[in-house]
Image: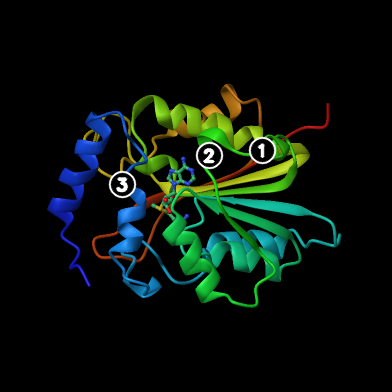
Amino acid sequence: MKEFNPIEYKKMVKSYQENDDPTGWFDSIYTDAQGDYKAVFWADLEANEYLIDWLKEHPNTSKNKKAIVVGCGVGDDAQALSEFGYKVTAFDISPTAIKLCKDRYPTTKVNFVVADLFNYPKEWFENFDLVYECNTIQVLPGKYRIKAREAISSLIAKNGHVLVSCRSRNKGEQEDDIPLPLDKEEINKFVEDDKLIQMSFLAYDDNQTPRVPHFFATYKKERE
Ligand SMILES: C[S@@+](CC[C@H](N)C(=O)[O-])C[C@H]1O[C@@H](n2cnc3c(N)ncnc32)[C@H](O)[C@@H]1O
């Protein structure tokens, strides 16, 4: 298995981004893991605790609610949503990530599929009661971050919720970082540009050493 080297990783990502191929490298992270989902360096191997808290606080009483997980990685958040009663579609641009999800959860009810957020199946448009985004925008550069946010917001049905989990930074800091965390101004575009209603907003530091600042924000699309 290939050893993870953060300096080489950042150089590799930068070269794809400079060649205007911002998604060309994702599959390599999963192929380098050689079939072992535990070797995917960004995978927590458990569902996001803030997602779980939100699901507990907003019990899903309907059997028909549909959720979609953007850039689902090795699949834990998607599996959790399924266990909370949602009909879940989870997608990733990396075919190897999707294979890892299916190997990891062989009896899952989640529909794990390969798809590109920038060109998703047209029937997904405004089709989901819950959209979950965790750490996808932050691994994209420049205009692709805006396209990604707009695409995420376009998946939500009327009255549905969008949940966003990401690393965070103060405006003007860490501007060359990979991943590039979101600042408050950027995440606020879900409200200002996509016209979602902010329902909650949490800024917190995780438990890593050194601690990494994060946002967990929830939005709702109003009935029209
Ligand atoms: C940093 S990882 C986060 C994975 C997972 N959400 C998590 O929190 O562990 C970002 C994921 O987004 C996927 N991704 C990036 N661009 C994408 C796109 N345009 N469409 C679908 N998936 C994408 C990558 O393949 C990768 O699995």
Does residue 177 appear left or right of residue 183 in this picture?
A: left
Residue 155, numbered label: 1
Give how far apart the Cα atoms at labels 2 and 1 are. Answer: 10 Å
Does residue 124 appear left or right of residue 178 in this picture?
A: right
Q: Amino acid at mark 3?
A: Trp
- Mark closer to the chain start, 2 or 1: 2
Q: Amino acid at mark 1?
A: Leu
Residue nearer the viewer, 217 or 162: 162
Instruction: State the image coordinates of residue 51 (x, y, percent, origin top left).
Output: 58, 59
Mark 1 Cα shell of 10 Å, populated few (<14), some (14-19), many (≥20): many
State the SS at label 3: loop
Given this view, does label 2 or label 1 mark the residue nearer the observer? 2
Mark 2 vs ligand 1: CB below 8 Å: yes
- Mark closer to the chain start, 2 or 3: 3
Mark 1 vs ligand 1: CB below 8 Å: no
Does residue 134 appear left or right of residue 124 in this picture?
A: left
Instruction: State the image coordinates of residue 168 (x, y, percent, origin top left).
Output: 38, 44
Res. 155 image quadrant: top right
**Residue depicted at 84% across the width and 57% down the height:** 64
Residue nearer the viewer, 61 or 50: 61
Mark 2 Cα shell of 10 Å, populated few (<14), some (14-19), many (≥20): many
Whether residues under marks 3 and 1 lie with C-beta atoms below 8 angstroms apart, the answer is no
Residue nearer the viewer, 128 or 92: 92
Q: Does residue 122 appear anywhere in the picture?
A: yes
Q: Is residue 183 above or below residue 60?
A: above
**Residue depicted at 31% across the width and 40% down the height:** 180
State the SS at label 1: loop
Q: Which residue is mark 3?
A: 25
Q: Which residue is mark 2?
A: 117
Instruction: State the image coordinates of residue 19 (x, y, percent, origin top left).
Output: 24, 30
Instruction: State the image coordinates of residue 89 (x, y, percent, origin top left).
Output: 66, 55
Whether residues under marks 2 and 1 lie with C-beta atoms below 8 angstroms apart, the answer is no
